[in-house]
């Protein structure tokens, strides 16, 4: 059995145990079929109303002659003008529609802003098939038409609104431009049980209709790029796109505006703590982290565990476990809606950062921790080895005992910033643009393995 097959079996066993806990919680608090039906219809109604509202608002604005850019952010004065030809058009449609500012949306906002500030590209959104510039700036056109030499970079989570993209991609191609897809990971293809069915279905459709039809792709790590190539080879795609990769930035929380919350301050001022950052979802492996800390508490270690992450899917039982835990509010803190100021404070004072993910596309908490001087303890998976190198401390995947040992080892040493290479978001944007302009896509699924 290969190492990859053994890893997948281990992950599947963990998922089976986690889902058993979720089913047990549901059985203890059952929902009758009629209530569930009503709930599902209400949820679908809310989604429909939200879509109708957005479409009606846009139609009303067009009818009244309202400038579609009037509500967009204003680009900082003094930013250089982008190129007039061979432009880089950075899509951020889903980020704007959702209003989200974490995860992929944080990456999109940071890269788009840095490209705009440096005159490297034009952030855009798709509205009714049109490309509109995101930032307001003097002399900016109300609408952007693709032209020869343009690069349309699908930077956002485009699997959430797949139908918007094929028409734009066709226009870009017909007019002599290039379509490039950004791949954050392909985990819904590699580990379907980690995601709900709709996400998995949408993601498979996105990969088949967008990624494989693009002229090129760029991933957020070499490990992710390799996984794309391996998947394309296994699927036997006839003409897969070439792929490159670039590293993400680490400095988003530096200089965060506003004051940290009282909850964040209490956690930072209490017992020495280890921090975990990320949405509560199955692939993050949070139950493993909690069990490791429970082992340490049982041994008399007076340390705290602080989680920053919004509630995710298929973790309802675990969320209840956190809220009802005997250490909740004492040595166990969960910040469900932390601000950048909260995160900056918590990174700055953490005794260390733990990341128990079973699979990732990059691993932002590793570089964010390094930038803030916090030691890193991470799952021993390929992408974390790539990002953390020799500067992180690794534990056996999904092994609470191994994690507890790694935390104790970190506690036995002074708090020293790990030697993990970090980039600013400005540098990350520059490297991405270099790859796009140089067409630096070294991996090709059609080449010999």
Image (tube, rainbow, N blue to C red):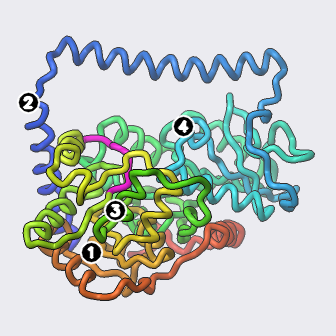
Give the residue at x 29% y 88%: 413
Give the residue at x 71% y 50%: 123
Tell me if label 2 and label 3 are in contact, CB under 8 Å: no
* N-terminal-most mark, 4 or 3: 4
Tell me if label 1 and label 2 are in contact, CB under 8 Å: no
- Residue at label 1? 380
**Helix, strand, or loop for circle 4?**
helix
| Residue 394 image point, x, y percent | 27, 78
- Decide which of 173, 154 is in the foreground and name it: 154
- Residue at label 2? 27
* N-terminal-most mark, 1 or 3: 3
- Residue at label 3? 276
Give the residue at x 47% y 44%: 206
- Between tags 4 and 3, which lies in front? 3
Crowdedness of circle 1 by 10 Å Cα count: few (<14), some, many (20+)? some
Q: Which residues are magenta?
A: 307-314
* Relative to 68, 34 lies left or right: left
């Amino acid at each position: 059995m290969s190492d990859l097959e053994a890893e997948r079996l281990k992950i599947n066993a963990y998922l089976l145990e986690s889902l058993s806990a979720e089913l047990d919680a549901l059985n203890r608090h059952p929902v009758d079929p009629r209530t569930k039906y009503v709930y599902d219809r209400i949820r679908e109604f809310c989604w429909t109303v939200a879509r109708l509202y957005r479409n009606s608002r846009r139609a009303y604005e067009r009818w009244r002659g309202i400038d579609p850019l009037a509500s967009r952010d204003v680009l900082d004065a003094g930013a250089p003008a982008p190129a007039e030809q061979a432009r880089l058009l950075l899509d951020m449609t889903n980020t704007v529609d959702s209003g989200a500012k974490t995860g992929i949306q944080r990456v999109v906002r940071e890269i788009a802003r840095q490209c705009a500030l440096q005159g490297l590209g034009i952030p855009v959104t798709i509205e009714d098939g049109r490309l509109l510039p995101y930032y307001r700036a003097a002399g900016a056109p109300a609408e952007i038409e693709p032209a020869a030499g343009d690069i349309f970079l699908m930077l956002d989570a485009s699997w959430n609104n797949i139908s918007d993209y094929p028409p734009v991609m066709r226009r870009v191609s017909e007019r002599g431009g290039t379509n490039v897809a950004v791949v954050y990971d392909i985990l819904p293809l590699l580990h379907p049980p980690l995601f709900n069915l709709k996400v998995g279905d949408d993601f498979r459709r996105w990969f088949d209709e967008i990624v494989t039809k693009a002229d090129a792709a760029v991933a957020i790590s070499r490990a992710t790029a390799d996984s794309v190539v391996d998947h394309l080879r296994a699927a036997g795609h006839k003409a897969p796109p070439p792929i490159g990769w670039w590293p993400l930035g680490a400095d988003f929380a530096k200089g965060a505006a506003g004051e940290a919350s009282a909850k964040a301050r209490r956690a930072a001022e209490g017992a020495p703590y280890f921090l975990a950052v990320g949405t509560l979802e199955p692939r993050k492996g949070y139950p493993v982290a909690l069990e490791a800390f429970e082992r340490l508490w049982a041994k008399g270690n007076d340390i705290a565990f602080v989680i920053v992450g919004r509630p995710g899917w298929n973790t309802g039982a675990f969320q209840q476990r956190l809220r009802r835990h005997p250490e909740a509010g004492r040595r166990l803190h969960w910040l469900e809606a932390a601000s950048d100021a909260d995160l900056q404070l918590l990174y700055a004072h953490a005794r260390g950062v733990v990341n128990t993910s079973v699979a990732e596309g990059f691993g932002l908490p590793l570089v964010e921790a390094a930038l803030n001087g916090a030691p890193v303890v991470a799952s021993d998976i390929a992408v974390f080895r790539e990002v953390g190198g020799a500067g992180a401390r690794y534990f056996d995947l999904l092994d609470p005992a191994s994690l507890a040992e790694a935390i104790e080892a970190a506690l036995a040493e002074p708090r020293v910033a790990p030697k993990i290479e970090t980039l600013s978001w400005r540098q990350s944007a520059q490297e991405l643009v270099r790859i796009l302009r140089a067409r630096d896509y070294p991996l090709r699924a059609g080449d010999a393995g």
